[in-house]
Amino acid sequence: MLIPKLASGLCAFGQILSDIKYNLMAACPMRLDGHASLDRIERRFQELRDQALTLLEKEEGIHRDRVSFSRGIDMRYVGQIHECSVSIGSLPVNADTIGEIRRAFDAMHEQLFTYSEPESEVEIVNIESIALLRSDHAVRQKIPPGGRVADALLTRRPMIFSADGSAIDAPVYDGAKLGENDELAGPAVIEEVTTTIVVDPDWHIRLDASGTYILRDQRTP
């Protein structure tokens, strides 16, 4: 069993390490035929991009130079009631690229539904602009070497580990004073800032250099 020192705070810790992503979508119904206004699609993409940048700067305090963008288009064959989301990266929408976008839709439709209709008319339903800020890579924790387990002892107190209600005198340790490769045998309790770890009788615990406790049942080979 693995128990990180931040076991009860991993959701918050993960949020800190996560990328920041904004997805902005707009309806843009249009058939991709000879009358399609590709300039309007491109303008709508630019508007979504500007909205995303404003949100990131205002809500997150992020400078626009750190943000990357990608694009998606929800498309379908005329007459269908469902659409496919086609990622086009940073590709602009114009007369030179629309054929490539159409082929990407046909390929995605075949991947999802096992068939495509290159001869059928296609229409756009929505467009989406995805703004992404990659988080800095987390540095793996490396805790100091241990070797002085006795200094981490806080107190001893009676604890109940069995269904019969009998108490066992067990030690309580300060997890902040344990170091790399420090080991304890149950019964014991380790108090961390965000969690408390109970080590049952017949179990063994070791603190890894990464800050993760490794628990093993000594009765298991």
Image (cartoon, grey):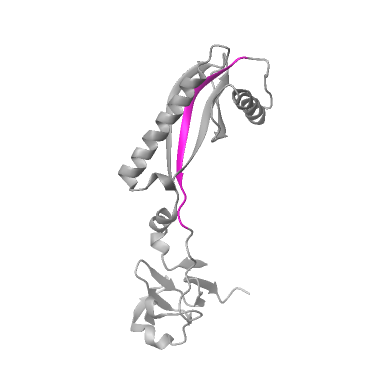
Q: Residue furthest left?
A: 58
Q: Is residue 125 magenta?
A: yes
Bounds of the magenta span? 121-136
Residue visible at 38% across and 39% down in the picture:
53
Where the C terminus falls, by quadrant? bottom right
Looking at the image, residue 168 lies above or below residue 14: below
Q: Position of residue 101 (x, y in %)?
A: 60, 26
Q: Position of residue 208 (x, y in %)?
A: 51, 74
Q: Nearer the viewer, residue 78 or 51?
A: 51
Residue 219 visible in the displayed image:
yes
Residue visible at 30% across and 43% down in the picture:
58
Q: Position of residue 163 (x, y in %)?
A: 42, 70
Q: Quadrant of residue 151?
A: bottom left
Q: Is 154 situated left or right of 205 in this image?
A: left
Q: Position of residue 220 (x, y in %)?
A: 60, 73
Q: Residue furthest top?
A: 35
Count how many numbered circles sit on residues in the image: 0
Residue 167 visible in the displayed image:
no
Looking at the image, residue 51 lies above or below residue 118: below
Q: Quadrant of residue 9?
A: bottom left
Q: Is 200 situated left or right of 220 in this image?
A: left
Residue visible at 62% across and 23% down in the picture:
102
> Which is the main secondary structure of the residues drawn in magenta?
strand
Q: Nearer the viewer, residue 98 or 191?
A: 98
Q: Is residue 129 magenta?
A: yes
